[in-house]
Image (tube, rainbow, N blue to C red):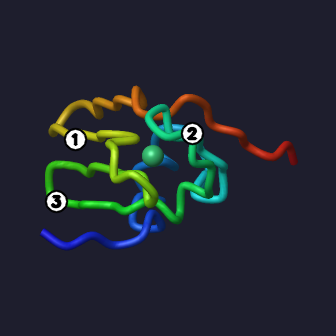
Amino acid sequence: MTHVDGNALAGMLADLFGFDSTGAIGECAGCRHRSELARAHAYVTAMGAVARCEACHGVLAVVVRTPTDMHVSLSGLARVSIARR
Ligand SMILES: [Zn+2]
């Protein structure tokens, strides 16, 4: 399966945070690489998505959508920094 850039996660992240957060800076819990979430490698299917670190390819986030819920794991992110508006 090939990946696309993290911008493909924009809709799912907007559902989660309430705004487009692809410009947020995420820090990989595995290798401490920091970059915009838009630069993550995104693997998107009809059921959800997996975002992987562009540096070490570790899993940053997993989103699973069901007809009634959205399940999100951000366990691969040590932190997310979002600029205040
Ligand atoms: Zn990493």
Is 60 on the left-hand or right-hand side of 45? Answer: right
Which residue does the numbered mark 1 point to in the structure image? 65
The kind of residue on which mark 3 rests is Thr
Crowding at mark 2 (Cα within 10 Å: few <14, some 14-19, many 20+)? some
Q: CA distance from mark 2 to mark 3?
A: 27 Å
- Between residue 30 and residue 76, name the one nearer to us: 30
The label number, if any, that marks residue 45 in the structure image: 3
Instruction: Identify which residue is drawn at 15% across, 49% down.
Output: 47
Which of pointers 3 and 1 lies earlier in the amino acid sequence?
3
Instruction: Identify which residue is drawn at 42% across, 31% down.
Output: 74
The label number, if any, that marks residue 32 in the structure image: 2
Percent x, y for residue 18?
A: 58, 42
Asked if 74 appears above or below 53 in the picture, the reply is above
Count the numbered circles shown.
Answer: 3
Q: Mark 3 or 1, which is nearer the eye?
A: 3
The kind of residue on which mark 2 rests is Arg
Percent x, y for residue 59?
A: 32, 42
The label number, if any, that marks residue 34 in the structure image: none
Q: CA distance from mark 3 to mark 1?
A: 10 Å
Q: Are marks 1 and 2 in contact (CB under 8 Å)?
A: no
Q: Mark 2 or 3, which is nearer the eye?
A: 2
Instruction: Identify which residue is drawn at 52% across, 49% down.
Output: 14
Some atom of ligand 1 lies within 8 Å of the CB belonging to the residue at label 2:
yes
